Amino acid sequence: MRSKYANVRTRVGAHAFASKKEARRYRDLLLLEAAGAIFNLSLQHRFRIAVNGVEVCAYVADFTYTEQPSGQYVVEDVKGVRTALYRLKAKLMKAVHGVTIRET
């Protein structure tokens, strides 16, 4: 069965990714981590988005990591299509957590 956006699920080691593009970015991030340019690489980190104590939704980042030497925490999403739901969650992440999602 063909996926909605024609992406091809791809495995890298023990990890399965929604697309070839996401898998390729993971390989790049592994190289950056090995070189010491980033650390604390994490996959599929879940952020709770709550307003006035009520959980509205959750945003699941493709990758999170910290850049060297700046120490900047990065929340990254590999995008092929910027859906309306994604755009809304990106705005909520900025409003609730103060996080601007880096799109690749």
Image (tube, rainbow, N blue to C red):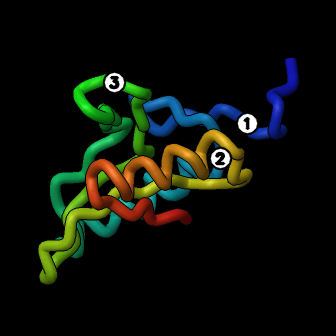
Rendered-image quadrant of the N terminus: top right
Q: Earlier in the sequence, mark 2 or mark 3?
A: 2
Asked whether the beta carbons under mark 1 and mark 2 sit within 8 Å of each other, the answer is yes
Label 2 or label 3, whichever lies nearer to me, is 3
What type is the residue that disc 2 sits on? Lys
Q: Is residue 53 above or below residue 34?
A: above
Q: Secondary structure at mark 3?
A: strand
Q: Is residue 67 above or below residue 88?
A: below
The residues tagged by marks 2 and 3 sit, at their Cα atoms, a distance apart of 32 Å
Where's residue 77, x and y in %? 49, 53
Q: Which residue is mark 2?
A: 20
Q: Residue at x 32, y 35 (%)?
A: 51
Label for residue 8?
A: 1
Q: Residue at x 44, y 45 (%)?
A: 62
Looking at this rendering, what residue extends furthest in the bottom direction?
A: 69
What type is the residue that disc 1 sits on? Val
Q: Is residue 31 left or right of residue 67?
A: right
Q: Secondary structure at mark 1?
A: loop
* Observer-nearest of 82 and 56: 56
Q: Which residue is mark 3?
A: 55
Where's residue 103, x and y in %? 53, 63
Q: Is residue 2 left or right of residue 81?
A: right
